[in-house]
Image (tube, rainbow, N blue to C red):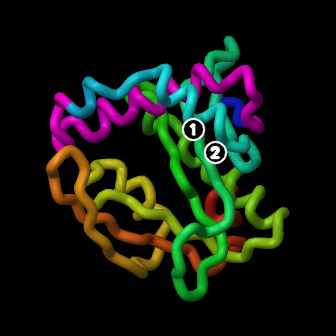
Amino acid sequence: MVTVREAKLEDIKDIAKVHVDSWRTTYHEIIPIDYLNSLNYKEFEDKWKSRSLKGVFVAQDEKGSVFGFASFGPIRSEQEGYDGELYAIYLLEERQRQGAGRALLAKGAEFLLQHGFSSMFVWVIEQNPSIIFYQAYSPERVAEDNFEIAGVRLKEVGLGWPDLSALKTLLNR
């Protein structure tokens, strides 16, 4: 059973671990392994400690162990027609495809709606195998960009849901 709840300061260590471990498993064929191996739990903890946890949710199992998180808030880039953003959603590899991602996305959609947002946008590395997760909920492809990480040029696509209420309904079926 999955429980999704608001993140607390005590969750930061677990969030950092999920963040690093998920990057290593998700991007191992996309980003150089040396870069992924250099990711440091403590550095990620420090980054998370410097942020607000407003709009951050964790997925935990029946024993209370955190195995996933998602972060939502106001859009950070200019995207016509979009006001909310999914900043990140990561699950430990062994807990993927079991409904936790959907539950986190639903909680985030609800959060954004409660805070006056009407739409949601997310950037996804095009080669990310988890892009199919987003595509399952019929987003519009609204933007493209390129960036470099560890010497590798990557393409990211901007996916959006112009009607957040419709997405929430879809997620809660």
Q: Which mark is residue 100?
A: 1
Q: Nearer the viewer, residue 134 or 38?
A: 38
Q: Is residue 41 visible?
A: yes
Residue 14 in the image, given as x and y percentages of width and height = 58, 21
Circle 1: residue type: Ala
Report the span colored magenta: 5-34
Image quadrant assignment for residue 13: top right
Q: Which mark is residue 59?
A: none
**Residue occupying image coordinates x 72% and y 76%:** 118
Crowd around label 1: few <14 · some 14–19 · many ≥20 (10 Å): many
Circle 2: residue type: Ala
**Residue occupying image coordinates x 26% and y 24%:** 37
Q: Left or right of 168: which side holds 135?
A: left
The quadrant of the rendering that contains the N terminus is top right
**Residue occupying image coordinates x 27% and y 62%:** 147
Kindly indicate whether the residue at mark 1 contacts the one at mark 2 (C-beta within 8 angstroms). yes
